[in-house]
Image: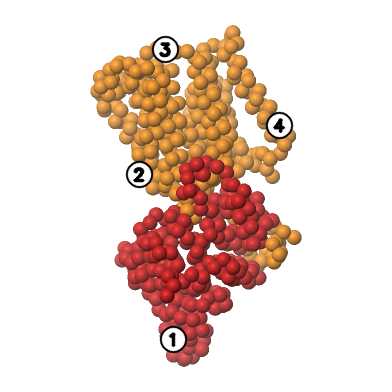
């Protein structure tokens, strides 16, 4: 059996008396596309934060490419091959698009001297390549703060890819993006997955987006893993329908609603 | 409109700067220049240096240090303790150069230790913690009589050479400006701006934010400590209330805000203007100068949030953003409404921008 890129076991996250994530196991195989869905407040983003070390775990462990990252510092996670995007877009607004990209490459730990240099040509070329891929060429030297919401989503995706990750966590990459651009993003993700073997774990409210991209879907509700399986199987799962639409729908329509 | 990119303006600015530097270099050689005038200018260099150093943490990194004067005081006091005979713990008189360096290093070391704790705080918490540390240090100096001679203060050997120190500080300030300009262009400098813009994002993208914050804080304190040391030596006498004084922080903050936060030249221009106001204008309104200082601060916050550099279109940070007032809504926020891109201009009015069609072939059409 191949070793998973990312494997979390028994993840528990409590905020005071509130258990946001309760004993969740999740894994992603190399080059796999996994969707993570669930109603609002079901703990998806908190789970993401635990996996990417934005938050400390209350219990459980996370393995990334065979390294235990449960207790490493957050900035080391990117070096070990995991990058992510955020539900609330995080770009450096006072820096230009290309500066945002260059800054996201992993070379800070190579040596202290590298910190006190400008980006070498290879880094700039790589950044330009991704800027082209993500259709941001025209905006290369604009401040990220002057970009529209959709363009910032693309930039954030580009920044996540600058570190040559083996897995990318996408947190609602399509929210606030217009439909034609969503199709584009979908194509780019598929391309990256196929050509570079990047694995994706994505939180998404757009069910179609998940269905088109993912081989496997994990459903969360009230902080617990409710179901897991192929997109088609998930759509017919009574428990999932109940979580999304309430018990009545599940009883009446016998699972055909989604 | 970004005037800082306009060539004629850059040439004019370059000529003015060169003329100013030549004037300053020649000034001590002119026969009618008084030492007191040179000393006033030396104090201005000190204030400019404090602005530049404060701007490294406050403007670039976004950590507003309300206790910056503590590094000045630490440098000054360590140098004074070493050079003065009045400290009963260190009675011998140390030579000048080691005393200055140890003073600066002490400020840097202290900042490194304190920064490791306080730089975990964000926003106003950090600012207040640093203000508290300033008061704490002043009282420690006052109480620790054997070392510091308490509230009476210390006297240093009178060995003043005003023109020499005028030159030393001028060169150091010019070096600091060049250093800031260079630093902003490195990955380290860019990472500081990234920390200001989005610290969690920066950390997640592999930037060791804690280390970079502590480093820049340490350097800032070291540099301010050095100027404090030189001030102690030139002033020949100091006490807790003159070495650790809040006004010195306020000056650094005001000068930087007036010039433009997070820019290389903003702190320099801001402090020169502030000094000019103080020496020329306020001299005629002695009774009211504090009132005017307050009014100017209010004016900057309300009408000049990006400072003088911002007037010329430089990438200065708005004060309101730095202090988290208005947050994301403050400027340049764009929202998508029915496919029509709208963005808010600086007055908060919606302006319509031409809709840019999404193209599938790289968007460069």
Q: Nearer the viewer, residue A229 or B144?
A: A229
Q: Is residue B364 above or below residue B242?
A: below
- N-terminal of the pair, mark 4 or mark 2, is 4
The residue labelled by disc 3 is B159
Read off the residue under disc 2.
Answer: B117
Q: Secondary structure at mark 3?
A: loop
Asked whether A2 or B347 is in front, the reply is A2
Foreground pick, B276 / A162: A162
Report how far apart the C-alphas of labels 3 and 1 lie in the structure. 89 Å
User: Would you call the spot at circle 3 few (<14 residues within 10 Å), some (14-19), or many (20 or more)?
Assistant: few
Asked whether residue B79 appears in the rendered view, the answer is: yes
Q: Quadrant of the C terminus of chain B?
A: bottom right
| Chain that appears red | A
Say which mark, if any, is on residue A238.
1
Gap between marks 1 and 2 measured at Cα: 51 Å
The chain that hosts pointer 2 is B
């Amino acid at each position: 059996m191949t070793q998973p890129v990312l494997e979390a076991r028994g993840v528990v996250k409590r905020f005071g008396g509130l258990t946001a994530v309760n004993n969740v196991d999740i894994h992603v195989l190399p080059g796999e596309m996994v969707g993570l869905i669930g109603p609002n407040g079901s703990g998806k983003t908190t789970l993401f934060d635990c996996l990417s070390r934005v938050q400390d775990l209350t219990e459980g462990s996370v393995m990334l490419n065979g390294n235990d990252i449960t207790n490493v510092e957050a900035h080391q996670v990117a070096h070990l091959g995991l990058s992510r995007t955020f539900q609330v877009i995080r770009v450096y607004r006072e820096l230009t698009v290309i500066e945002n990209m260059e800054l996201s490459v992993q070379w800070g730990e190579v040596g202290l001297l590298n910190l006190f240099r400008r980006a070498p040509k290879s880094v700039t070329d790589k950044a330009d390549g991704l800027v082209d891929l993500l259709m941001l060429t025209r905006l290369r030297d604009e401040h990220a703060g002057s970009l529209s919401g959709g363009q910032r989503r693309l930039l954030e995706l580009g920044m996540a890819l600058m570190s040559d990750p083996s897995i990318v966590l996408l947190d609602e990459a399509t929210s606030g993006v217009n439909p034609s651009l969503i199709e584009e993003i979908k194509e780019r993700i598929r391309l990256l997955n196929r050509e570079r073997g990047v694995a994706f774990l994505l939180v998404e409210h757009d069910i179609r987006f998940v269905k088109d991209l993912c081989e496997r879907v994990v459903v969360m509700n009230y902080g617990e893993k409710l179901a897991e399986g192929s997109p088609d199987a998930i759509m017919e799962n009574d428990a999932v329908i109940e979580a999304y639409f309430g018990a009545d729908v599940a009883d009446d329509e016998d699972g055909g609603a989604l | 409109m970004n005037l800082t990119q306009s060539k004629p303006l850059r040439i004019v600015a370059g000529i003015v700067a060169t003329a100013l530097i030549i004037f300053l270099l020649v000034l001590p050689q002119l026969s009618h220049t008084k030492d007191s005038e040179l000393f006033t200018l030396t104090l201005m260099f000190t204030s400019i240096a404090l602005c530049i150093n404060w701007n490294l943490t406050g403007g670039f990194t976004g950590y507003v240090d309300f206790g910056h004067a503590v590094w000045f005081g630490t440098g000054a006091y360590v140098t004074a303790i070493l050079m003065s005979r009045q400290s009963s713990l260190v009675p011998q008189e140390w030579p000048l150069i080691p005393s200055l360096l140890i003073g600066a290093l002490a400020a840097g070391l202290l900042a490194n230790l304190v920064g490791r704790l306080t730089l975990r705080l964000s926003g106003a918490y950090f600012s207040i913690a640093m203000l508290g540390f300033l008061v704490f240090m002043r009282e420690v100096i006052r109480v620790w009589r054997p070392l510091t001679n308490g509230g009476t203060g210390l006297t240093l050997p009178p060995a003043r050479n005003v023109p020499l120190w005028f030159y030393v500080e001028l060169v150091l300030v010019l070096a600091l400006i060049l250093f800031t300009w260079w630093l902003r262009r490195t990955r380290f400098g860019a990472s500081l701006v990234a920390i200001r813009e989005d610290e969690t994002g920066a950390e997640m993208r592999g930037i060791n934010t804690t280390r970079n914050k502590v480093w820049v804080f340490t350097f800032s304190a070291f540099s301010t400590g050095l100027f404090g040391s030189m001030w102690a030596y030139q002033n020949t006498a100091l006490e807790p209330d003159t070495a650790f004084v809040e006004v010195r922080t306020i000056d650094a903050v005001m000068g930087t805000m007036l010039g433009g936060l997070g820019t290389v030249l903003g702190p320099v221009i801001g402090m020169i203007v502030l000094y000019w106001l103080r020496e020329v204008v306020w001299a005629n309104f002695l009774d009211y100068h504090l009132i005017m200082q307050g009014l100017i601060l209010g004016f900057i916050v309300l009408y000049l949030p990006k400072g003088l550099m911002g007037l010329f279109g430089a990438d200065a940070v708005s004060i309101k953003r730095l202090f988290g007032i208005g947050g994301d809504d403050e400027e340049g926020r764009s929202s998508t409404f029915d496919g029509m891109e709208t963005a808010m201009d600086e007055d908060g009015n919606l302006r319509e921008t031409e809709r840019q069609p999404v193209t599938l072939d790289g968007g460069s059409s």
